[in-house]
Image (cartoon, grey):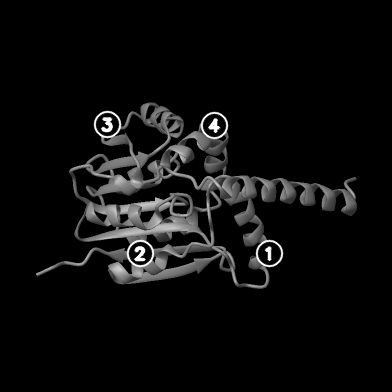
Amino acid sequence: MVTKARLFFVSGFGAGLAASALVMRAAHPPDAEAVARRYRGWARLYHWIGVTLQERLVPARDRLAEMARLRPGGRVLDLACGTGGNLPFIRERVGPGGYVVGVDCSLDMLAQARALINARGWENVRLVRADAAALDLGARFDAVLCSFGLSSIPDCAGAMARALAHLEPGGTFAALDGRLSGHPVGAPLSHFVNLMARVAGGDLSRRPWEWLAAHTTDFQYEEKLVGALYLAAGRRPIYI
């Protein structure tokens, strides 16, 4: 049986490693290429974790689809698509008549997404390797989704601005991600998760929903899991 002392030692050791890694990273803030290199070694593990979590996150993802107004035939941009965990969820809602583009900066993550697309035989799903903050696809979309990406994209505000520029007027930007909880139950866990996330290049202390609220209309915001998750959505303004 694992004793409390051993659990304390293991958790403390892990936190110590994370803290040390943070100190080493402080002098070298990540850019898109650094993030891509960081994911290179664990794309397969990330994919396995992401697939495992799909069932747990079904209610949140269903709500995100509602907030994003996903419809059959819709054109959707999946920002920071990673290994493609969102693609089945999006493709199910837009159907064969829709169009989906997944964007990520990591070739290794995209290779996993490509394998999924080939296995499903989807002909209306395309993948693009690009820095989200410099995105220029020459196309417009009805919706942009970003799940667990805004906490890890180095230039988060720049990426959101580029995503908004790819929306049709009235199109929706919807995001799902972790946050630092202020709830007595959620706070300790979310702060520990944030420590580990920062080692991988993420930062749950960001508040991207504030940028979204300031630059969109019909803004919506919800929290789940005692404040450890948030959903936010807003529509690109229609200028007359």
Of badges 1 and 4, nearer the viewer stands 1
For marks 3 and 2 on the same chain, the one whose residue lies earlier in the sequence? 3
Q: Which numbered disc, 3 or 2, marks the residue closer to the eye?
A: 2
Q: Going 58% across and 46% down the picture, which residue do you hit?
A: 25
User: Left or right: where does residue 222 sit relative to residue 9?
Assistant: left
- Most extreme residue toward the front, as rendered? 27
Which element is circle 1 on? Answer: helix
Sequence order check, earlier mark of 1 and 4: 4
For residue 17, what is the image quadrant? Answer: top right
Q: Earlier in the sequence, mark 3 or mark 4?
A: 4
Say which of marks 3 and 1 sits in front. 1
35 displayed left or right of 174? right
Query: Where is mark 2, residue-wise?
Result: 233
Q: Secondary structure at mark 2?
A: strand
Label 3 SS? loop
Identify the residue under disc 3.
123
| On screen, residue 114 above or below 203 | above
Q: Tell me the distance, in whole angstroms, between the alpha carbons under discs 4 and 2.
A: 30 Å
Q: Amino acid at mark 2?
A: Ala
Residue under pointer 4: 44
Q: Please state, as top left, top right, bottom left or bottom right, where the C terminus lies in the image.
A: bottom left
| Badge count | 4
Residue designated by label 1:
188
Crowd around label 4: few <14 · some 14–19 · many ≥20 (10 Å): some
Q: Residues within 10 Å of mark 2 (few under 14, many from 20)?
A: many
SS for callout 4: helix
Horizontal side of residue 47 vs 96, given as left or right: right
